[in-house]
Amino acid sequence: MTSHITGGCACGAVRYEAANDIEFSFNCHCRKCQHSTGTGHSSAFALPVSTVRVQGEIREFEAGSDAGAATFSGFCPICGSPMTSRTERFPERIYFHAATLDDPTVFSPMFTVFENCAQPWDPPRKDLEPASH
Ligand SMILES: [Zn+2]
Ligand SMILES: [Zn+2]
């Protein structure tokens, strides 16, 4: 396991780095993730927001609510790559999409969420445990 992770968007305008303090990793099949990724699920990991340094602008839009708390999806305003999501329910945490990693092999999902929203053409992985959000 590397001690440091780096990543960015497709065009390079957004770069980030953080200590490898990944709290957990997951595949999310909710409709918000389907919209922001353009496919059946997102693959994302959680970092303590205080450890992340971002260069460039991650623009956010409010993507509805999560148990009554506002959630935000972040993307690169130049190339549109989905980058992050976060919820005011857990303000100390930020989620990054796995494909933003310079070395995506660092990512290993531990569970799935919102598998009830999964599309038949992108079923949840059977070898991963469903987890409540
Ligand atoms: Zn970009
Ligand atoms: Zn989701």
Image (tube, rainbow, N blue to C red):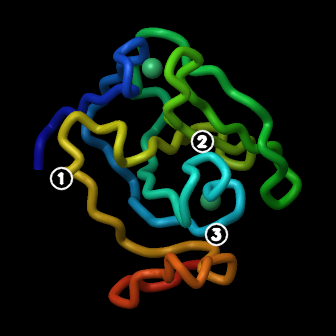
Viewer-nearest residue: 97 or 35: 35
Kind of residue at disc 3? His
Kind of residue at disc 2? Ser
Question: Assess mark 2: CB under 8 A from ligand 2?
Answer: yes
Q: Which residue is mark 1?
A: 105
Gap between marks 3 and 1 measured at Cα: 24 Å
Question: Assess mark 3: CB under 8 A from ligand 2?
Answer: no
Q: Looking at the picture, how far across and down is residue 117, in whole percent?
A: 68, 76
- Residue 28 occupies which quadrant of the picture? bottom right
The residue positioned farthest toward the right in the image shown: 68
Kind of residue at disc 1? Thr
Residue 2, compared with residue 75, is above or below; it is: below
Residue depicted at x 69% and y 44% = 87
The residue positioned farthest toward the left in the image shown: 1
Gap between marks 2 and 1 measured at Cα: 20 Å
Q: Looking at the picture, how far across and down is residue 53, in whole percent?
A: 39, 18
Q: Quadrant of the C terminus?
A: bottom right
Q: Which residue is mark 2?
A: 85
Circle 2: element type:
strand
Viewer-nearest residue: 68 or 27: 27
